[in-house]
Image (cartoon, rainbow, N blue to C red):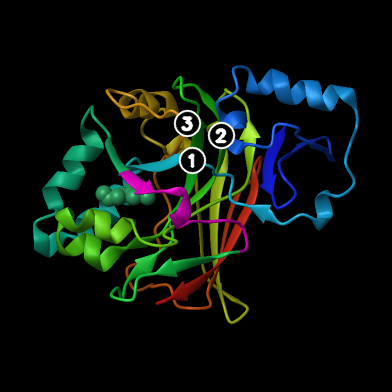
Amino acid sequence: MKLYRTSNGPYVEHAGSYYRVPLTSWDAIVTHDDLQGYLLSIIDKGEAANDFASAQIEAPVGNQEVWAAGVTYYRSRSARMEESKSAGGGDFYDRVYSAERPELFFKATASRVAGPGEHVRIRGDSSWSVPEPELTLLINHRGQIIGCTIGNDMSARDIEGENPLYLPQAKVYDRSCALGPCVLIGREPLSTPTPIRLEIVRDRRTEFSGATTLAELKRTPSTLVEYLFRDNSFPFGVFLMTGTGVVPPDTFTLASGDQIRITIDPIGTLENKVAQGA
Ligand code: DO4
Ligand code: MG
């Protein structure tokens, strides 16, 4: 069951049919007491809509904050240690990879999030930027995982590598995050062999492609959520990106016009074009 936020309002998809969701406030949907039951009751009525194709799919975000976990894959740990070598980074990324407490950071407000087909941005003052393809959890205000989507944690690696205290500037800026195309509803985590694939297309040619699987994710989604909710409340629910396991080689940087495609099969493909500057 997939939940879409669109220009026509929300729809739920099941077995190839789309149903309009009468509750039109996204925040009310996310904080519903029994979201799965509510959506199933809409599907059970059997009144499929025929206007989904004319709707513009939007980022599945209302008043939810977006948070992110870092260094949850070995590949991310190694890339981070390399990029921050001259800032003395060898040690702390390794330490956070093995520590009990995960790295969690604030990533975006809804206004900074791009939806499917919209532009994501690279900073005007960065010359080394990459996308980070991440399984992203949707968690309700009670701390329960209610579904997942695809996230792109756009990152300025030069700024991040210069000094770890620059992390918020490397990670949080206008359109530094993309989410979508839908929320796959369910409390159960996706199975560990599930692949996360990244493809970057430049001038119609694949410039980079890579993949990982959820088996490489070092921490469980529920552990990340448990830490996020320690002494922190999210009245509208929250998105949590679970970290990247796909890092292009150090010689690669994104350019304006690049097309980024992130695929997590049970959810779909999130596609965005890159822009730099205003
Ligand atoms: O500490 C840097 C952030 C790492 C990150 O965003 C990731 O591993 O996905
Ligand atoms: Mg990341």
Q: How many numbered marks does the figure carry?
A: 3
Q: Are marks 2 and 3 in contact (CB under 8 Å)?
A: yes
Distance from the alpha carbon under mark 1 to that under mark 3: 8 Å
On the image, numbered disc 1 is attached to which residue?
A: 63
Identify the disc placed on residue 16: none
Magenta segment includes 239: no
Crowding around mark 2 (Cα neighbors within 10 Å: few <14, some 14 to 19, many 20+) is: some
On the image, numbered disc 3 is attached to which residue?
A: 237
Q: Residue at x 47, y 49 (%)?
A: 110
Position of residue 267 measured from the top left corner of the image (x, y, whole percent): 64, 42
Q: Which residues are magenta?
A: 106-117
Q: Nearer the viewer, mark 1 or mark 3?
A: 1
Reply above or below: 119 against 53.
Answer: below
Q: Residue at x 10, y 60 (%)?
A: 87
Secondary-structure class at tag 2: helix
Secondary-structure class at tag 1: loop
Under 8 Å from ligand 2: the CB of mark 2? no
Q: Residue at x 61, y 57 (%)?
A: 116
The residue sitting at the bottom extreme is 203
Q: Are marks 2 and 1 in contact (CB under 8 Å)?
A: yes
Q: Nearer the viewer, mark 2 or mark 3?
A: 2
On the image, numbered disc 2 is attached to which residue?
A: 27
Residue type, label 1: Asn
Residue type, label 3: Gly
Under 8 Å from ligand 2: the CB of mark 3? no
